[in-house]
Amino acid sequence: MALNIGHIIKGRYRSYRLVEALKTPTVFKAQLLSDPAIKPASVVVKTEPGPEKICLRREWNNYRIPAIATSKYIRELCDVISSNKEEQRAVEADPEADTLYLVFEWMDHALRTVPPFGYQINSDLPKVISKAVLSALALLTQLNAVHTDINPNNVFLSNVGGPSPIVKVGDLGNMLLQGYNKIRVQSLPTRAPEVWQGLGCFHSSDVWSFGVTRPIFGAKDKIVENLTEAWCIAKIRRLVGPIGPPISNRDYEEEFFIAEHLESSTFKHPDTGLETPFIKVGSLREELEKLPGPKISPELLDFIEFLLVVDHTKRPTASEALQHPYLQSLEASE
């Protein structure tokens, strides 16, 4: 059943009124209906249609793992509702139900939408974000799992302007076993070199995705733009150095060949008539230092470079990254 604003979903013990579409037609802000004298609490109701329902079912199954369900660094699943024809009811989750709704705790912002004042009020916010996300990833690797979709839309924050911001990782519908290599997962801007190569997605691949998530420190742009596969590979080569060859796959080999050409070639600009590089960026540190707004601290620059090691076998784990001096300074101030 399609969801619409104003619709009421009835669970076994609670009911929820949809009040705002966050991602039409699958994700809605809703109000928990209770005592009329009490201000309704907000939650997020999420569903998926058709073939995409497999991710929603996978997400529900992942929350059945106690370590995930109880982690303070992972967004809380509050309710599970399935439907059968005339009736909507909370269940001990039937993953084959025609309709499935997951109800999550409300968080004020996705990382992508955190207002600039949040970073101005709390200069430690990048550290708080880093600690929470890396702690969530450290948990997943204990389960031999990878998130595969760490990006600014899947990291959530509340109380940004307060003394103790809350940061949690969400959207576990694409969580898979470590080493998954049937297809190349991760979004193009956050895809790790080894995933581009077709080697598989590992714990270290999640660490890479977090490292290239530029809104960590308040910038809205992406370190690697979401253009074409070859363009993304070329940008990574320019930012952090060469990537090893892909596995024997004609499509992957063609992408890497085009990327190498883009990185080293020029074209005659139609407006100026001058020879212009296809890829204009410099090294990672050079690009980060050129960002508009307040300068990024040298300590944060060091931390980002520490995360973005091209060779995934030498890239730090989340647990190792949590021991970096940049984050240890947060521990000292708490």
Image (tube, rainbow, N blue to C red):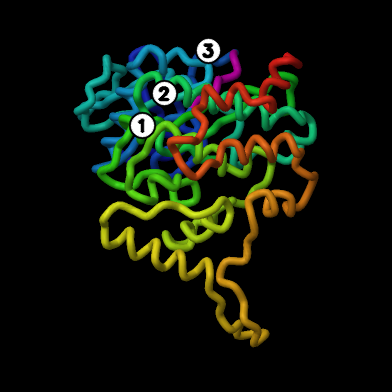
Which stretch appears magenta? 38-43
Whole-Å distance between the Cαs marked 3 and 1? Answer: 37 Å
Q: Where is residue 167 in the image (x, y as percent from the top left)?
A: 59, 25
- Residue at 23% of width from left, 25% of height from top? 95
Number of numbered discs overlaid on the protein picture: 3
Q: Residue 35 carries which label?
A: 3
Q: What residue type is labelled 2?
A: Leu
Q: Mark 3, residues whose alpha carbon is within 10 Å: few (<14), some, or many (≥20)?
A: few
Please tell me whether the stretch drawn in magenta is mainly helix, strand or loop.
loop
| Residue 154 is covered by the magenta coloring | no
> Which quadrant of the figure has residue 37?
top right
Question: Which amino acid lies under the numbered mark 1 shown in the image of this protein?
Answer: Met
Q: What residue type is labelled 3?
A: Asp
Element assignment for label 1: loop
- Kindly identify which numbered label has been placed on residue 160: none
SS for dot 3: loop
225 relative position to 162: left or right:
left
Quarter of the image for the C terminus: give it.
Answer: top right
> Pointers 1 and 2 in contact (CB under 8 A)?
yes
Of labels 3 and 2, the one closer to you: 2
Q: Which residue is drawn at 26% across and 57% down?
A: 249
What is the number of the mark on residue 140?
A: 2
- Which residue shows up at 40% across the image and 45% down it? 194
Q: Residues within 10 Å of mark 2 (few under 14, many from 20)?
A: many
